[in-house]
Amino acid sequence: MTEEKNAGAPEELDLSEQRRIRRAKLKELQDAGQDPFQITKYVVTAHSADVKEKFDEMEGKQVSVAGRIMSKRGMGKAVFCDLQDGKGRIQLYVRIDELGEEPFAKFKKTDIGDIVGVEGEVFKTKRGEISIKAHKVTLLSKSLIPLPEKFHGLKDIETRFRQRYVDLIMNEDVRRTFEIRTKFIKHVRAYLDQRDYMEVETPVLNTISGGATARPFITHHNTLDIDMYMRIATE
């Protein structure tokens, strides 16, 4: 089996051509009355981490998961996918005889980056990988811009910082850092809330620089026509 390297489009296609193809796929869905952006709710009964941690009790049971397709392997009558949700990744096993010819044909048109909902059975492959055998797949959101090529990942610093959402999708260690930061801030806020502290939002921009000898970040306020400085805590 071969693995798709760039969101389901042939490798020789440039980025603009891939975008055109994806928009054409979306229009085809919309014209058929199957606009994925009209689906605003999907019931999830388990997450990837839950299935893996509780496999012994969940094996053979039906679950409903949702997440982003990060890879697709195999273009015959069976496709393996990696699905990434809010708690990790899990493999999907999609077969034509389980899904049906028409739904399987629609699934093969999905691209890496698309968000799908999957109902299926928890099982373990012959190689011992915990997976979900799909019985029904629902396209929840169409990815119109291809993700970075997975084999090299997203390494460009400028892109990572200016498009942090892509960085969080592609780099698990970065996402983990943000998860830890979020939990820490939540814990500190709860600790202070329990002691009746009041949270106050102070100005981000000031007319004088702070931070001792630190080099300040300077911007210009067009309406007031004055230079302002970002507070050092935010910077």
Image: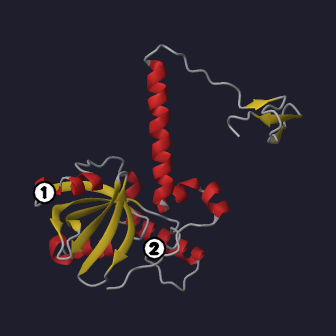
Residue 125 position, x and y percent, is 18, 73
Q: Amino acid at mark 1?
A: Asp
> Viewed as shown, does residue 198 lie left or right of 40?
right
Provide the secondary structure element on which disc 1 rests. helix
Disc 2 or disc 1, which is closer to the eye?
Answer: 1
| Disc marking residue 112 | none
| Residue 58 vs residue 32, the one in the foreground | 58
Mark 2 or 1 closer to N-term?
2
Q: Which residue is mark 2?
A: 7
Q: Is residue 19 left or right of residue 86?
A: right
**Image quadrant where one finds the N terminus:** bottom left
The amino acid type found where label 2 is placed reads Ala
User: Measuring 41% from the left and 79% from the top, which residue is drawn there?
Assistant: 4
SS at mark 2 in the image:
loop
Give the percent coordinates (x, y) of residue 69.
38, 65
- Residue under the image location 63 percent in, 24 percent down: 201
Q: CA distance from mark 2 to mark 1?
A: 33 Å
Q: Is residue 27 above or below residue 175?
A: below
Which residue is tagged 1?
56
Q: Quadrant of the C terminus?
A: top right
Residue 72 visible (yes or no) = yes
Packing grade of label 1 (10 A; few <14, some 14-19, many >=20) is: few
